[in-house]
């Protein structure tokens, strides 16, 4: 994990660890509660790669669905405004236990649109913040409640049409008052226009089935698949993922390879195996797998960045720059500190 991917806040204050533990005990069913309490207590996931909060491979650690809302409600964008948000979907990511949630955000002024990645299986919320954001001051009352202009459900007409959802989240008179505030600021469609760059990112997210799989959908597809070979390939992929979670990378790679032997066009298996090779430091094999994925899916922005990391470690800076530029062209947000380090090392 490269140190320049970390984004730490200054003088951050949040609910105490004990207060957050009480929320977990009170708000969640036993199975989810056990997963959160068993999760890594951290500001950044130890196996993460990519830009914090802006990459599916480096999601923001939080504690549960309400933890997601409490975290995002305290973020302020570059103009200092509060965020409107909704959850687009969940995706499974190699080397990270449990699915990652993707949120679309926009500031209440309608100027700044973004995508944020969060991971809800942790005992406390991160104190790091994504690049381009600040945290609001901690309020002993309001910061502990979910006074947020957003939801962890998908809203088809986002940022419009959230009145009912916000009222239900808060309830009572306070919910009604908060909805009036929301409707006061979110009433002009000409004010909330997504940029072409943001729409391009949404297109990439819409096609993410080719990269990661929603966990429930993956299991459903696995059961319903009629082709026996495809079933077997997916079974080996799932087994390999289990070994990866245990950091038994040799066995993981063995199972990913069996999946590829059964289905030579299994894009996801190549991608996950490439990331596993990268984690092991087997850079040549990682590059071969990443290159195979690019041939199958030349619009995969994330895989170009993954290959650039391998070239960076090999000090092949010309090829690293080429892949960084391609990833950016396809909508991937590359951390500026990584760019600065690459410039320094490559003499540019």
Image: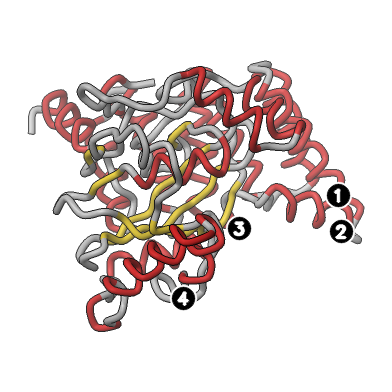
- The disc, 4 or 1, on the residue closer to the chain's N-terminal end is 4
Numbered mark located on residue 161 in the image: 4
On the image, the x and y values in percent for residue 180 come to: 36, 70
- Give the mark, 2 or 3, whose residue is nearer the N terminus: 3
Secondary element under disc 1, as helix, strand or loop, is: helix
Count the labels in the image: 4
Q: Are marks 4 and 1 in contact (CB under 8 Å)?
A: no
Picture quadrant of residue 16: top left
Do residues under tags 3 and 1 come within 8 Å of each other at their CB atoms? Answer: no
Q: Are marks 2 and 3 in contact (CB under 8 Å)?
A: no
Q: Which residue is mark 3?
A: 209
Compare marks 4 and 3 and give the one earlier in the sequence.
Answer: 4
Which residue matches tag 1? 231
Secondary structure under the numbered disc 2 in the rendered image: loop
Q: Residues within 10 Å of mark 2 (few under 14, many from 20)?
A: few
Residue under pointer 2 = 225
The residue at the point 52 percent across, 60 percent down is 172
Cα distance in 3D space between marks 4 and 3: 27 Å
């Amino acid at each position: 994990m490269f140190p320049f991917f970390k984004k730490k806040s200054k003088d951050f204050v949040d609910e105490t660890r004990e207060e957050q533990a009480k929320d977990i005990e009170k708000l969640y069913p036993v199975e989810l509660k056990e997963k959160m309490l068993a999760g890594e207590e951290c500001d950044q996931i130890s196996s993460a790669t990519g830009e914090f909060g802006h990459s599916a491979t480096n999601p923001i650690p939080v504690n549960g669905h309400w933890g997601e809302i409490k975290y995002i409600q305290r973020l302020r964008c570059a103009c200092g405004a509060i965020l409107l948000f909704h959850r687009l979907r969940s995706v499974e990511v190699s080397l990270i236990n449990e699915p990652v949630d993707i949120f679309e955000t926009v500031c209440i002024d309608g100027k700044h649109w973004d995508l944020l990645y969060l991971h809800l299986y942790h005992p406390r919320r991160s104190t790091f913040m994504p690049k381009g954001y600040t945290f609001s001051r901690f309020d002993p009352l309001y910061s502990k409640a979910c006074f947020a202009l957003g939801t962890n459900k998908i809203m088809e007409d986002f940022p419009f049409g959230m009145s009912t959802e916000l009222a239900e989240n808060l309830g009572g008179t306070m919910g009604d008052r908060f909805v009036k505030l929301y409707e006061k600021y979110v009433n002009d469609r000409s004010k909330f226009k997504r940029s072409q760059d943001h729409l391009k990112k949404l297109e990439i997210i819409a096609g993410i089935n080719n990269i990661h799989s929603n966990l429930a959908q993956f299991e459903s597809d696995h059961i319903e698949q009629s082709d026996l070979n495809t079933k077997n390939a997916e079974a080996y992929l799932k087994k390999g993922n289990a070994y990866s979670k245990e950091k038994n990378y040799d066995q993981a790679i063995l199972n990913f390879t069996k999946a590829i032997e059964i289905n030579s066009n299994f894009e996801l298996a190549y991608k996950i195996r490439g990331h596993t090779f990268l984690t092991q430091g087997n850079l040549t094999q990682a590059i071969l797998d990443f290159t195979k994925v690019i041939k199958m899916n030349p619009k995969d922005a994330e895989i170009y960045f993954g290959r650039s990391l391998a070239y960076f470690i090999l000090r092949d800076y010309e090829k690293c720059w080429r892949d960084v530029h391609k990833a950016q062209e396809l909508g991937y947000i590359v951390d500026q500190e990584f760019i600065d380090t690459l410039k320094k090392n490559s003499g540019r």
